[in-house]
Amino acid sequence: MPQRIRIIGVPMDLGQSRRGVDMGPSALRVAGLQARIKHLGHTVEDIGNLEVKQPEEMHVGEKRAKYLQEIAETCADISKNVQKSLEEGFLPLILGGDHSIAAGVAAGVASHFRKDKKQIGYIWLDAHGDMNTPESSPSGNVHGMPLAAIMGYGADELVNLGGFKPKAEPANIVIVGARDLDAQERKIVKKSGIHVFTMRDIDERGMREVMADALKYATDDTDGVAVSLDMDFVDPTDAPGVGTPVRGGATYREAHLAMEMIADSETMASLDVVEINPVIDEHNRTALLGVELVLSGLGQKIL
């Protein structure tokens, strides 16, 4: 069914050490995002980019959570825009930027549903767990912490966005495609009670079975599912221009199947696409694939 989509750009690269992901929103737009969504029959509104401070403007701050205050301020802005979009009948499509922005997206989606005492589920398509805290992180990069914050672990500035925690219940949160977790992070993931499907699970069971279970968990007694697509979910052979590439990821077709099944479920409440780095990409291949995956998530079919 035709939908109303609102595109929100967040050119954030404060959350990680490698520069360049702040150009992700531009790369996706250059790849024809708006026109191709319209071609599917949806109504599209692009409100441009939210204002994000640059690393050159400020001190890194606490080394266990670099640029935390500035990231939290941007996430609060994201939350307001996401909540407003949902209230006005739009599906928010948020273009990152590094993955720290997801804390703001989750706060906005959860706040919207919480007004009617409803819960959300979360599907996190990512090579990484993003479940570190300032105490466990070996790097202090906040892009490795947003899912922990959504769960209620970590820095108060992110955990308490919107004035409540957690943003979703552990039983309704699913990571798909994990293959690179830090040692301390593994302990947090196991303790948290969320569902994790690693690349081994996908190898053994296939993407169809894994996504069927992921959607079952995310939609169990919830009224909408927030989807977070880190482009490093896909193998670097197909998505070379990402912030933190890890070999052995989802194939081109597996990634499309995951998004197609999400579309088939008709439960997606928001979508963020993050960690595209044009500086290390090849002729914008990763952003072009990102657009394709967004289209699959919005209902594009082969036949």
Image (cartoon, helix red, strand yellow):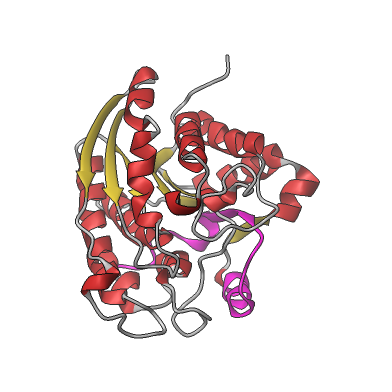
Give the residues drawn in magenta, as a range: 164-191
- 162 over 284 or under it: above or below: below
Foreground pick, 245 / 187: 245
> In the current view of this chain or complex, which residue is farthest to the top?
303
The residue drawn where x is 35% and y is 59% is 101
Foreground pick, 294 / 22: 22
The residue drawn where x is 25% and y is 55% is 78
The residue drawn where x is 31% and y is 75% is 67
Residue 106 in which image quadrant: bottom left
Q: Position of residue 162 (x, y in %)?
A: 25, 64
Q: Is residue 127 left or right of residue 224?
A: right
Q: Quadrant of the C terminus?
A: top right
Foreground pick, 100 / 119: 100
Residue 134 visible, this orientation: yes
Residue 116 visible, this orientation: no
Q: Is residue 176 left or right of residue 143?
A: right
- 248 over 134 or under it: above or below: above
Residue 298 in which image quadrant: top left
Residue 196 in which image quadrant: bottom right
Foreground pick, 192 / 61: 61
Q: Position of residue 50 (x, y in %)?
A: 21, 52
Q: Quadrant of the N terminus?
A: top left
Q: Position of residue 147 (x, y in %)?
A: 46, 64
Q: Is residue 166 magenta?
A: yes
Q: Is residue 34 left or right of residue 129?
A: left
Q: Position of residue 46 (x, y in %)?
A: 23, 36
